[in-house]
Image (cartoon, rainbow, N blue to C red):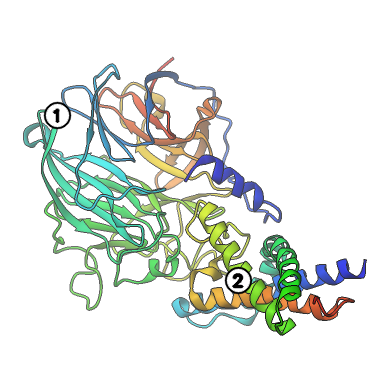
Amino acid sequence: MRRILVFLLAVLLAASAGSVIQSLVNLQAIAALTGPIATAEQLSTLWFDLRHFMPVLAAIFLPIMLLSLVLSRIVLKRATLGTVPAVFVITALSTWAALLIINQLAPMPTLIALNRTLAGTLLLLSCCALGAVFYHYFSRSRSVA
Amino acid sequence: MSLSRTLLFTLALSLPQVALATSSLPSSLPPSGPKVQILTESLEYPWSLSFLPSGGFLLTERSGQLVTLGSDGQVLQKLDVNLPEFYAAAQGGLLEVLLADNFAQSGRLFLSYVCGTANANSVCLASASWQDNQLTDVKKIFRATPDRRGAAHYGGRMVQLPDQSLVLTLGDGFDYREQAQNKANHLGKIVRLKQDGSVPADNPLVGQAAVATEIFTLGHRNVQGIIYDAATGKLWSHEHGPKGGDELNLLQAGVNYGWQVATTGIDYTGARISPFTRFTGMAEPVHQWSPSIAPAGMTLYRGEAFPQYHGNIFITALAGKALHRLVLDGNKVVQEERLLTSLDSRLRDVRTGPDGLIYILTDGPAGKLLRLTPQ
């Protein structure tokens, strides 16, 4: 039960971080066109995205993180690797692969706006990967090896 | 994009929906439903319809076919167009066919289409001659810049103005939405060209430095409907919003229509695109739809077969699966009626025929040409 709760918390944190980053990147792009955006508008956008975009991102991250943690466990049983870097890299690569598949299936070229640029994509991968590391660190069995 | 993919993603992303305001216009007009006749079936993703002076039809299929129909709708010919660098994928391919005003004498027509490759494509415009049911003298006269990756948001509709110039609608390429505000390129713009592709001297940005002088208006997302109303001299367009925020606009040279700074729509993922629904210096839409109807074609009715529709705008909707009839009072939409909902079909294009009847193309791999006649 504890593992499940920690896992859900990890997904929530990863998706929240992704949501906030996307909001900030998007606001920056809008501000480049309009000039400075009032703090109230920025906060409103952050809150809006946390309520509406974050759950979608969580639904995307959840299966990726689940699969990545299982994959990490398998890999670490067979290879001597640093656990945290392995979990991070495997989850990041899984997220990248998942985004490629999603964008192939989606009617639009790129589903998640943050995924349109290399920097944004790396931030998105990092959010999911750090969520997996969070789970690994705070779940009862800290070593998956 | 396939319908199944669109539905799948709509379902997948419908978890947290924002409550968007719906149009509050009265829709309780008296039943005036026209009679629907199917003229042709089994058209492959038909996109644009035009009327031959001889009485038949010339229409495009997105995969690259120029289809000739007789006046009874019988398919007479399907011609593979051999356009320079033609590229068909997802939303891209052969788009609009526009017959020049003097087509009966000159045989001249214009084709908008997607050109390039998967990683570098854009909207091109070609002029050609139509002689003996063949396309000859094909010349590429314009290519929107810059190229983009992906195959979405091309625009591609055209209209000819009384001064013979062509107005061509374009899209933002989906992934490049910020560029709709960049005057140095054609993404998210409507451009105006002479019939040889050159820039009219009275285009609004002519004389300014570091701008694309073809630009007529800017700040658009994906414009798939444009009409010029000779009776009023007004130029109307509509465009796809994201999730919500489809717009009807009254176009004026040099005006910024706001995308992506001012929009009532949100991203398909639920994310906010902009904190602004309106912004100083950017024109507000005449009318908008939230949730989106996905407007894809438009005509302003000036025929005589339906006197009750005189001066109304008709808009075909893909996602909305209806023909929207808008009643105007000057520049305002005062009533809206949804027609043809019982067809349950994505509707791609609508035109007023020379006979005053209304013609519609349905979307899909088995598209139809429909004719609306009075009851």
Label ID, residue B133: 1
Kindly identify the amino acid type of the residue bearing the numbered disc 2. Leu
> Which residue is drawn at the image coordinates 51% and 38% (left, top)?
B335
Label ID, residue B161: none
Q: Crowding at label 1, few (<14), some or many (≥20) Cα neighbours within 10 Å? A: some
Q: Chain of mark 1?
A: B
Kindly identify the amino acid type of the residue bearing the numbered disc 1. Asn
Q: CA distance from mark 1 to mark 2?
A: 54 Å
> Which residue is drawn at the image coordinates 6% and 33% (left, top)?
B105
Q: Secondary structure at mark 1?
A: loop
Disc 1 to disc 2: CB gap under 8 Å: no
Q: Mark yes or no: residue B301 visible.
A: no
Q: Chain of mark 2?
A: A
> Which residue is drawn at the image coordinates 66% and 76% (left, top)?
A127
Give the residue at the far left of this rendering: B105
Q: Position of residue B359 (x, y in %)?
A: 35, 27
Q: Position of residue B149 (x, y in %)?
A: 38, 62
Q: Mark yes or no: residue B175 visible.
A: yes
Q: Position of residue B193 (x, y in %)?
A: 18, 56
Q: Is residue A101 above or below residue B162?
A: below
Q: Going by the image, does B198 lie left or right of A43?
A: left
Q: Is residue A143 above or below residue B253?
A: below
Q: Secondary structure at mark 2?
A: helix
Label ID, residue A93: 2
1 and 2 marks on the same chain: no
> Which residue is drawn at the image coordinates 28% and 40% (left, top)?
B64
Give the residue at the far front of this rendering: A78
Q: Crowding at label 2, few (<14), some or many (≥20) Cα neighbours within 10 Å? A: some
Give the residue at the far bottom of this rendering: A82
Question: Quadrant where the C terminus of chain B lies?
Answer: top left
Q: Disc 1 vs disc 2: which is toward the camera?
A: 2
| Front residue of this view, candidates B113 and B203 | B113
